Image (cartoon, rainbow, N blue to C red):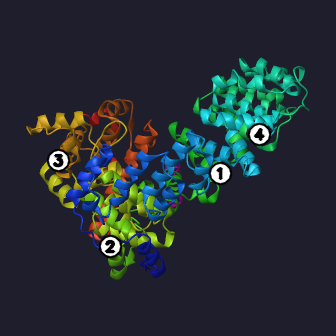
Amino acid sequence: MRFTHRLSRYWLGAMLAAGLAAPSLANDESFNQSFEAARAQQWDRINHDAIRGHELEGYVEYHELKSRLPGVSSAIINDYLHRYRNSVLSQWMRGVAQDTWGARQQFDDFLAISDGIPQGTTRQCWYYRALLDQQPERAFLGGRELWLVGHSQPSACDPLFDRLRANNTITGADIWARLMLAWRSGEDAMLRYLPGELPSDWQAQRGAFERLQSDPGRITELPSFVSHDAPGVSSLYSTAMARLVRQDTARALAVWGEIKSRAPLTDEQRHDIEHDLAFYSLVRDIGANAQWADTAAAQLGDQDLLELRTRKALEHRRWQEVAAWIERMEEDNRRDAHWQYWLGRARQQLGDEAGARKAWQIAAGQRSFFGFAAADRINQPYALENEPVVIAERDLKDADALPSMRRVAALYRINEPGLARAEWYYLMRHLPEAQRPTLTQYALTRQWYDLAIYAAIRGDHWNALDWRFPQGYADLFQKWGKTRGVDPWLLMALARRESSFNPQAQSPVGARGLMQLMPGTGQHVSQQLGVAWQGVTSLEDPETNVMLGSAYIRDMAARYSGNRVAAAAAYNAGPGRVDRWLADSDEPFDLFIEEIPFRETREYVQAVLTYRAIFEGLAKGTTQGVHMMTEHERTTRYSGALQR
């Protein structure tokens, strides 16, 4: 199915009017000189005449205005915000002005440039402080919401909270509610001062809490500490049980059996307690709780408990239980490919081949790892469910003229990819939903692959596979796949999962580039290949990154007898862990993957294998003959024997 989108003429006109300058006479070299000067606060080096009309002139002005705060009027800031309202610059400028004026308690200026509740707790506290004398009811509601959290808030909130306590907007019940939230969250520092803030008519509850704080199991004695009719007692019961469940799950069940019938709890509180008890009993394999946990999971019917119980049955290869727990799920959840696949496996193990095939047929209609695995079981081509979106050429040309697109292009041109992405992310968050498809396709035509992927996902275009799985750097992956003797579709899948084809991607731990290589790994592989190591930044060069990454995944595959499933797991979790997992295993591929201990790695392996099939299917125009895994990878046992 193909969908056609047209760019709204009204929207285009509005975007153009919002900031389209005449064709720029300023060149990038002049702009870069002034931009570097602005960043360094060397104002005398900025040549305004040379940069006038440049697409990025607002970036220099941003630094100039920022440096002048707080000595610049709110009118000047608002003028800037209006001119750059379709740029992330407006968000940054508003934020830095709010920070400056909020810290100085210049609340009239703060409100003058605010456009609603600001981002960030500190700014929100300043915002509601600013509203105290102008819109007190709104300030009271917002301030109370900031109070009712189970963690400490910034010091900027203290004057707001003091005012709200003084006028009794924050009541004893609110202090108690926060105390219970903090206790539930394990925020011990807050437990040292919040009880002292309780008013005199809450002292009985305070005394009960202090008795339970070190031993929540004493909840059975609560009626002797405080009346059940006292305010806050139900939350004391539920919070004490939450703490006890996490501290001693076996004891918690015994305590629950004693207090369940007499505790003054709401239905929701009872549900939450029993959910937690069942969950921790299953996760921690509390044998004494097993029968109760099964009964509770069945009665509560919560999907996470049913899934957990199904996995426990899989872990012990109790196929009758696997089928039974899956069949307890609500229909929408049960029909997911994941559970239909395992329902099919359970039925097959129980000798019901027809039932197994029926479940696998349902799963095979879905685009996912388990959908594709089910399709392999019944020799059926994979269902890609691709729905290309057609964008008119005229709309793409119009998009090229938008100030926002000119800024993104200019930022890439001057090697500021981080700022380019910031502009794009801001635009996608604020753009009318109907207009995202045009700019998504435009990004693809500019080979801004990661921006197209982000926009497609942000716009919920899950079936627009040409956007979500573009043929990014395909020639490089084909070239180095052939050179290294590595599946090029696997290389593409790894890069798609690792970086969304962003060559400048950096992870929090330091991995870089398309295939997210750690600098130490890149240097080590370079030495192995006899290639001069060009330093960390060389990993942001697509050619270098794929050259090294393809060699690394080749080595991982060789370590496991060419097995790409184990290699993908090692690429994510490290070969040492995979060695241990294999040593403890002797299972077919599906059980090995399902039981990978790390959720991140489990989902990573499934995604990479799925992506490689999607890339190959899209490139060939059909999934006939396309498989996630080779026949050997699907039929071999996953054990230490894979290691060479």
Q: Residues within 10 Å of mark 3 (few under 14, many from 20)?
A: some
Which callout, 2 or 4, points at the residue further toward the start of the chain? 4
Which callout, 1 or 4, points at the residue further toward the start of the chain? 4
Comparing labels 2 and 1, the label whose residue is closer to the camera: 2
Alpha carbon separation for disc pair 2 and 4: 55 Å
Amino acid beneath label 3: Thr
Which callout, 3 or 1, points at the residue further toward the start of the chain? 1
Q: Is residue 290 above or below residue 401?
A: above
Amino acid beneath label 1: Arg
Q: Provide the secondary structure element on which disc 2 rests.
A: helix
The residue that label 4 is drawn on is 269
Q: Is residue 161 above or below residue 356?
A: above
Q: Is residue 644 visible?
A: no
C-beta proximity under 8 Å, tags 3 and 1: no
Q: Is residue 87 above or below residue 99?
A: below
Which picture quadrant has residue 396? bottom left
Q: Which of these two is toward me, 27 or 155?
A: 27
Q: Residues within 10 Å of mark 2 (few under 14, many from 20)?
A: some
Which callout, 2 or 1, points at the residue further toward the start of the chain? 1
Alpha carbon separation for disc pair 3 and 1: 51 Å
Q: Which of these two is toward me, 287 or 528?
A: 528
Alpha carbon separation for disc pair 1 and 4: 23 Å
Q: Which of these two is toward me, 376 or 227?
A: 227
Which callout, 4 or 3, points at the residue further toward the start of the chain? 4
- The span shown in magenta is 346-355
The residue that label 3 is drawn on is 544
Comparing labels 1 and 4, the label whose residue is closer to the camera: 4
